Structure formats: structure tokens, C-alpha cells
Amino acid sequence: MNTNRLSDPLAKALNDQMTNEAHNAQIYLSYAAWASDKGYEGIANFLFRHSNEERNHMMKFLEYILKRGGKVVVTTIPEPGPDPASVNDCFEKVFKSEVENTAKIYKIVDLSLQEKDWATWNFIQWFVKEQTEEETMALDLLAKIKKAGGAKANADALYTLDNDLGKTPDDAVLAQDTSVENP
């Protein structure tokens, strides 16, 4: 008996996104290793935590495909690319990666809507919210590095930023979570 409830195009899109989440984990891992090598332990800690978060996203896709009776296809993960040239470059690359990931998530939203696969549409909504958080977090990081001097940040500013990021929570505050009492 066939228990697969995913169309071939949707199964492919979900498997591709699973691989993309693994790729994003490698990007964060690579940047974390770069930051650690440069002596930015707070930044490295922040990036290592986000690497783990991306791996968790990968597992959510894997598990969802299995639960819907689909076939998980594990493929090669692309290499993360070159090391950042600076802390500013690192956060610009993080933002770019998150925006690209959002576009891929939106394609799955569109496909699930077209196919009227409401289970997948419902599943992917968690990732829509997550990507809003990820982009907000990346923009917040870019704002912090800009205040520190951007690409020309001096050692004192980078030291402060490094200490701050070591304690920065993993989740950004979203617009829908604010109120008059809690802006």
C-alpha cells in the first residue's frame, strides 16, 4: 500500500530545502570557526548556536517528509564558500543567506498552496515565521556592526560587539509580538 501523501514536485522541494538547511548550518559553522580563529569567541558562540539551529531545521524537514510517507533523499551539501573578510562582511553574508533561504521557503509555500496540500502549507508556516525571525536577527546584527563602525569598526568596538553577541538571545523580537505595553 502506498502511504506517500506528497506529490513528486513537493517531495523534491522539501528534500531540496532539507539540503539547504544543512548547507546553512555549514555556512554558520564555517563563519563560527572563522570568528573563533580571529579571537571573536562571543561572535563564534552566537554563530555556533545558529549552526545547530539550522541543523534542527534540517531535521524538521527530514521528519516531515518521513511522516508524510515520502522518501528522504540525502544529497551532497555545497561548501560554505570563502571565509568572511571582516566581522561586517560576516554579518552581510549571514543576512544574504537568510534572505535567499526565505525565498526558497516561499516557493514551498506557493507550491503547497497550488497543490492544495494543506498539511504541507501548515507545516511550512512555522518556517515562514522562523525566517522572519532570522532576517530580523540578521538586520539587528548589521545595525549593531554599523554602530560599531561597519567595515571600519575599531578593535574596541569589535571587542564590545563580541562580548555582546556572546550573550545575545537566539530569537529576535518580531513585530507581531510587540504591543503598547511591550514595544
Image (cartoon, rainbow, N blue to C red):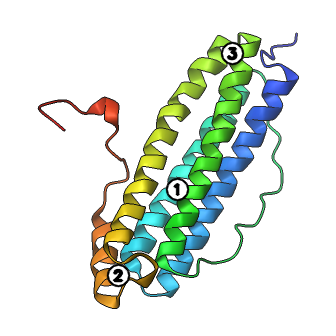
Separation of marks 1 and 2 at Cα, in angstroms: 24 Å
Amino acid at pointer 1: Asn
CB atoms of marks 1 and 3 within 8 Å: no
Q: Disc number at residue 158? A: 2
Viewer-nearest of discs 1 and 3: 3
Tag 1 residue? 52
Task: Return the x and y of residue 90 as percentages of the image width and height.
Answer: 53, 71
* Residue 124 location (% of width, % of height): 59, 27
Q: Residue at x 41, y 72 (%)?
A: 43
Q: What secondary structure is found at the residue carrying circle 3? A: helix
Q: Quadrant of the C terminus?
A: top left
Answer left or right for 48 relative to 3: left
Q: Which quadrant does the N terminus fall into? A: top right
| Quadrant of the rendered image containing residue 64 | top right
Could you classify mark 1 by the number of other residues whose Cα lies within 10 Å: few (under 14), some (14-19), or many (20 or more)?
A: some
Residue 20 vertical position relative to residue 71 in the rendered view, above or below: below
Q: In terms of sequence position, does the residue under pointer 1 or pointer 2 come before the other? A: 1
Q: Position of residue 96 (x, y in %)?
A: 59, 57
Q: Going by the image, does 14 lie left or right of 150? A: right
Task: For marks 1 and 2, give the one nearer the viewer.
Answer: 2
Mark 2 nearby-residue class (10 Å; few <14, some 14–19, many ≥20):
many
The residue indicated by pointer 3 is 113
Disc 3 from disc 2: Cα separation: 45 Å
**In terms of secondary structure, where does tag 1 sit?**
helix
Q: Secondary structure at mark 2?
A: helix
Marks 3/2 in contact by CB < 8 Å: the verdict is no
